Each structure stands twice: as C-alpha cells, then as structure tokens.
Image (cartoon, coloured by chain):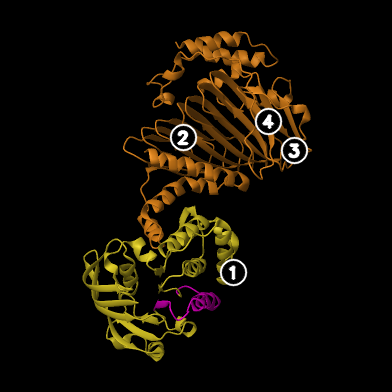
Amino acid sequence: MSQWLAHVIERAAAVDDWLSPVRAEALAKLKEQSWPGRRTEAWRYTSLHAVEDLSLSTESSAQAEAPAIAGLDALDLVFVDGRLTSDLATLDLPEGLAIRSLRDKSDTAEQVFTQVKPSHHLFGLVNDVLATQGIVIDVAPNATIERPIRVVNFATDNVESHTRVLVRLGENAKATVIEHGSGTGHSLNTAFAEYDIADNARLEHYRFALHQGEAIHVGGSHFKLANKSRLNSTLIGYGSQLTRLDVDIIHAGEHAHAKFNNAYLLAPKEHFDLHSTIEHAMPNGTTEENARGIIGDKAKAVFNGRIHIHRDAQKTLAELNNRNLLLSRGAQINTKPELEIYADDVQCAHGATVAEIDEEALYYLLTRGIDKQKALVMLNFGFVQEMVFDMPNEALAEWLQPILKQRFEDMMERS
Amino acid sequence: MLTIKDLHARVEEKTIIKGLNLEIKPGEVHAIMGPNGAGKSTLGYVLSGRDGYEVEQGEVTFKGANLLEMEVEERAQAGLFLAFQYPVEIPGVSNMEFMKESVNAMRKARGEDELSSAEFLKKAKEACKQVNLPLDFLKRGVNEGFSGGEKKRNEIMQLIMLEPKLAILDESDSGLDVDALQVVANGVNSQRDGERSFIVVTHYQRLLDFIEPDYVHILAQGKIVKSGGPELAKEVEASGYAWLGQADEGEEA
C-alpha cells in the first residue's frame, strides 16, 4: 500500500459536503483498489514511484492570473492549487449559461458527478473523494454560448490539489470549453472533467495539459454523447515528471460524431501517458481520432488507444491513428492499439507508426532554397502543427503555434 | 545562363536522358516538347538535383558554375526554379511560413535583406492576386486540399515571389481549363523581363499560344531530335509525334 493513498483515504473520511453520499461510494471503491505496479495493465509503462510515498502540503494561498490569449475573449474561471480564485458572482454570463461552484448543490452536479467518468480510474476515484472545489457549467437547451469558457488550473510548488469540472450541454446547445492546466513546481494535481452532452448538442473542447518539470499531473476528460450530438476535442500535452491523462468518449446515443485530435511534445526526460477509450455502445456513431507525438531524448511517451464497439453498435465508423516521431535513440514510445469489436457491420481502422521524414516533401522544400536543417525542423514540427491548424478556434491556434514551435526548437537542440 | 553538354542520366537502373545538349541565354524562353516517356520531367528533376536521379555523363553549367556539384537547395539559391507537375501536399506546414522561409533564403543568397513580416505579406498579397488565389490560402497547409489547378497556380505564385534566374515549368498546363491556363500564362509572362530565362516543358502546343517561346525543341528517347522556332510547335500540333517513328511509351518516369 502506498503511504500517499493511505493518507488520501484518511483525508477523505473528513470531507463532509452535500456530495458525501456519492463520495462514500467512491471511497468504498478506492479502498478496494490495490496500488498499481508493473503488472497492472493500465500502468504498465508508467511508474507511480514518484507518488507512492509523496507528502505535499494541501494548503496554498498562491494567486495567479489567467494567461492572456489575444482575441480569445473567454470567460475565465481560475483555480490555483485547487482553490477557485475567480468570483463567480461577478461573472458576466450570457443568457442560457449558468456557472456554479461544486460546493453548492445543483441538479446538474448531481446528474453529472461520477456519472460520465468510468470508476476504474484510480486517480479519478481519488478526485471523487477529495475534490471539494470544482466548477459546474450548465448550458441550457437551445442556447449557443459564443464566448469560450476557460477553466484555468495552476499548480504551484509543494502543493497537492484536486480540481473537478462538470459540464452539461442541454439539447441543441452549443458551447466551447477549454481546460487549461499548467505548473512547473513539485506538485501533484488531479484534474478530472465530465461532459454530459444531450441530443443534438455540440461541444468544442480543448485540453491543454502544459505541466512541466517536477509537476505531477494526473487527470482525465470524459464525454457522454447522446443522439446526434457532436464533439470536437483537441488535447495538447507536454510531459513532466509524470503526466497521465485518460480520455473516454462514450457514444451513448445514436448518430453521434466525435473528433479527437491530440498531440504531445516531450522535452528530454519527460514522461507522458495518454489512455484514450472510445466506447461505441449505440449504432451509427462515428469517431475520428488522430494522435501525434514528438518525443525528445530520454523522454518516454505511452499511448494506449482503445476502441470498443459493442454488440448493438452496428454501422459504427471508427478510426484511430497514432503517429510518433522520436528525436533521438534515447526517446521511447510505447504505443498500443486495442480493438474490441462485437458488432459485425462496422468500419474500424487503427494504425500506429513511428514516423519517418517524407522524402518528397523534403525535396520540395529544398528546391525552394530552404536549408536542409530548417526544412527538417519544419517537417518534423509540421507533423504536430497539423493538429494545431485543425483547431476550430483561430485565437487558440495562433496563441499555441509559436509556443509549441519554441518548445520544439528547444527539444531539437537538446536531443 | 545554362549550358547542357552531352547529358546522360538515369533513374535507378534505367537510362532516360541519353546525350542531351542545350544552350539557354539570358531572357530566352525555350519550349521542350515531346511524347510521354521522352524524359521531359526527368530533365527537370536532374537539373534540380533530386535524389535517385543520377548523372552518368556530361556537363551542366549554370551561370558559369558546375550545377551538378551543387546541393538541391544551393541550386535553388543560385536561381534555379522548378515548377512541379504534381506538387506535394505538406499538411502541417503553412504556406505562409513555407513561403516566408523560402523567400528569405533566396534573398539571403542574393545578398539582400530579409523581408519583414509586413513587407512579406504585402508581396504575398500581390502575388496571390496575380494568380487568382484567395489570401486565406496562406494560412493553410502547403498545397493541402488544393485542386490540381490551385496547385499549379501556387507554383506560379512561388515563381513570382522567388524571382529566379531560370525557371523550369514542368507541364504547368496539364489538367488546366482555358481560364486557368490563361492565369498561369499571364503569371509567367509577367516575369519575362529580358533577363530571366524559362524552360517550358509541355506535351501540347496549347500553352505555347499563351507563352510564346523563342525556341522549340523536340525531346524524344532522351535527346533533342529537332530544334526550331515557334513554328515547330505548330507542326507538332498538326502532326503529333508519330513522325518520330515511335509510339508514346506511356507514363513518364
């Protein structure tokens, strides 16, 4: 047993709020869990050694401003070390949008909390029992919320924190939600988000997991799609001492469409682990997932892409593509496709590759007078930049592009 | 400008160019016509220095220097431009960053200052307009999702932006309707300044109605079998390539 987990269970007993009955169930499940080791499939390539006996402060009084993004004009909700520092009372909310604290009892929170996220995620259960602060976003049926809603999640130094985001989109509703996390200090942050997307609703979603250095970040974004709903999600991840994300996309209704692009850029020695699970439980759903990774020297990436097509999910169309670029011999990727198909009338494709340079593209750039070294940088970075170009929100793409480019150039230099 | 003497070149094990001679002076426009499989595209690739295209014999001098000893990017920086018949798509690299990098590489090679972002944008806007490409194409991936015609116009836009000394147009007319052909031809003609030279490679005479060549050469079986003035293109138009005594050999290497 890990001392840290024993301490979590101890602390959980002291949590007392309106969600206590649900938390108690999660706690019971958590107590049944054994500490994951190398033989635990979900943690096979990611060691939890750094967390096992971790002891950090749970108190913080740090303040931080949301990073400015030109042209984004988002409604910002800021968490610093798990504390909500934004004043919800002063938010200028458009019609059809309600934003509440998880502390306050609400129907939405009751309907969404632990109802979308599968309960097998160990750290998800930890978050269930300890995340007393969180945000509940409610978009009314037929409402279109033009301003993106951004949840900023900072982790500072020597602090453990837990944040939770619950989102419900009513029928025909439309919204953009950005989960924007970062931190460089020695910290542990768990951040889980659950999205319940009703019939015909459309969610544009971004998760930027920009934790670096000594930060330990474990979290997930989980989506339940009802009939004819649409999800367009982009996840951009750095590695850190340990970053682990779980994404579940559950087709709970028919004719839903999910697009999930993700890209990870690992600087030397960083660790990044993404487990994505696409559950097609109902017929006529489509999913397109593109995963791209660039891995620096002595860095390690883990990508596990699971597609599960249930017996009733006829006429499903699911594609998952994972491409990785290793910048040196010391870089490592463990990529594992998992296909489970129980329906007989489906189209499903799954590919994982370690990429090589496209010689024809290189030749083309050279014929335009671009030096070989520069051309290689452009092509290598282009591989991830494609995911940025594909983001529907231009302000976000324009903000992110130079940041990622700079990180990539530093990675090239150090690899 | 360019002197090719007794050039022999092969792709993998197959010799495609078999003793080609050509002399191009500044400001001249040379058309190279010929049946499929004659080695037309191969010539462009060999001159640009593409990997896998090996020179077996002969000399190529470009502005007094030995072209064959130069790397691909050095040839480009020296002023050699190849407009591709089938330009490649590079989805993750934007036209904007690609063109900017390219234009500045050329300017640097010519000893000129790099363009500022504003200067670049102004120039790019003008070039876009000239070849009838919407400005937002600059934000898109290089040739990504472009139609055949858009790709060809993008090549001509690059020609305008890069200001080469010698441009080789490899079947810039193929797959274009008359309107698109006119746009491409106008773009090319706007760059004729009495100094810049052109090699216009084409299967059909059609393009030469719009870009009038000074010389026309017929390339067959890896060498130039006949040279003449613009009237030679009309002859080809009238009689095809059958007089060469060989059938088309299908797709070109």
Q: Are marks 2 and 3 on the same chain?
A: yes
Q: Of callouts 4 and 3, which one flags the residue occurring earlier in the amino acid sequence?
A: 4
Question: In the rendered image, which quarter contains the C terminus of chain A?
Answer: top left
Identify the element where label 2 is drawn: strand
**Whether residue B111 can be seen here:** yes
Q: Of callouts 2 and 3, which one flags the residue occurring earlier in the amino acid sequence?
A: 3
Question: Which tint was used for chain B?
Answer: yellow
Q: Give the CA distance from mark 4 to mark 3.
A: 22 Å
The residue at which mark 3 appears reads as: A141
Foreground of the two, A248 or B235: B235
The residue at which mark 4 appears reads as: A77
The residue at which mark 1 appears reads as: B129
Circle number at residue A306: 2
Q: Amino acid at mark 4?
A: Leu
Q: Amino acid at mark 2?
A: Arg
Instruction: Tell me the residue at 47%/45% (across/down).
Output: A384
Q: Is residue A397 magenta?
A: no
Question: Which tint was used for chain A?
Answer: orange
Rendered position, B102 above or below A282: below
Identify the element where label 1 is drawn: helix
Foreground of the two, A169 or A159: A159
Relative horizontal placement of residue A77, taking residue A271 as reference (left or right): right
